[in-house]
Amino acid sequence: MTDEQQGSEVTEYYANGNVKAQGYMQNGKLQGTCRAYSEDGLLMAEYLFADDLLNGVTVEYYPSGVVFAKTEYVDDQKHGWRQTFYENGQVKSEMQFKNDTPDGECREYYEDGQLKSECQYSGGLLYGVAKLYYSDGTLQQESVFYQGKRNGTCKEYFENGRLMMACDFTDDKRNGTFYGYDSTGQLLETREYINGQEKK
């Protein structure tokens, strides 16, 4: 068995002599854990390889050493969950992938853990109801998507929970009656739209 077949640790260096990357190669391909470092020696990321392809969870770090992101890979493609984190350890965002494309649930959070937004992807395009929230958890916006475009009734709300506006959309264009309200619930205006153009 040759040295290449047996495998060996490989290390890449910066010009200042600090380690840039470190991993393990067998039969000329990366295998197992590979670590990447900044020029001043801080761990930036850890990767899992199988036959030179990313397979498993990749972990990225803040300079402080706190985890910044975790991403699941299968055969060099994002497949599963990708999560990002605030430096306090709280989840910042999480999204599902399939074959390197957003597919499934997607959520964002405020730094205190309160839900900020939620939506669904299919084949890289937004589908279904997408919601955005104020920092206290009150619904701020609600939109309906089909094949990545707004289709259906979209609504926005004041922080007190009252409706601010509502309008129907077709292929991302306003279609139908737009309703605008003040923060007490009083109707302020209505406008008519056809294919994104306001009727005069």
Image (cartoon, rainbow, N blue to C red):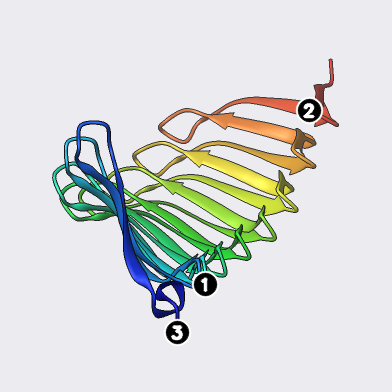
Asked whether the residues under the numbered discs 1 and 2 touch, taking CB atoms below 8 Å apart as contact, a structural biologist would say no
Q: Which amino acid does label 3 sit on?
A: Met
Q: Which residue is drawn at 68% across and 51% down?
A: 145
- Percent coordinates x, y for residue 37 in the rendering: 25, 46
Secondary structure beneath dot 3 equals loop
* Mark 1 or 3: the one toward you: 3
Q: Which of 77 and 133 is in front in this view?
A: 77
Q: What residue type is labelled 1?
A: Asp
Secondary structure beneath dot 2 equals strand
**Residue 153: image tag:** none
Q: Which of 36 and 166 is in front in this view?
A: 36
Horizontally, is 93 left or right of 37 in the view? right
Instruction: Tell me the distance, in whole angstroms, between the alpha carbons under discs 3 and 2.
Output: 78 Å
**Residue 51: image tag:** 1
Instruction: Tell me the distance, in whole angstroms, between the alpha carbons under discs 1 and 2.
Output: 59 Å
Horizontally, is 19 left or right of 26 in the view? left
- Percent coordinates x, y for residue 52 in the rendering: 51, 65
Q: Is residue 5 visible?
A: yes
Q: What residue type is labelled 2?
A: Glu
Q: Mark 3 Cα within 10 Å, few/some/many (few <14, many 20+)?
A: few
**Residue 192: image tag:** 2
Instruction: Tell me the distance, in whole angstroms, between the alpha carbons under discs 1 and 3.
Output: 18 Å
Q: Name the residue under label 3.
A: 1
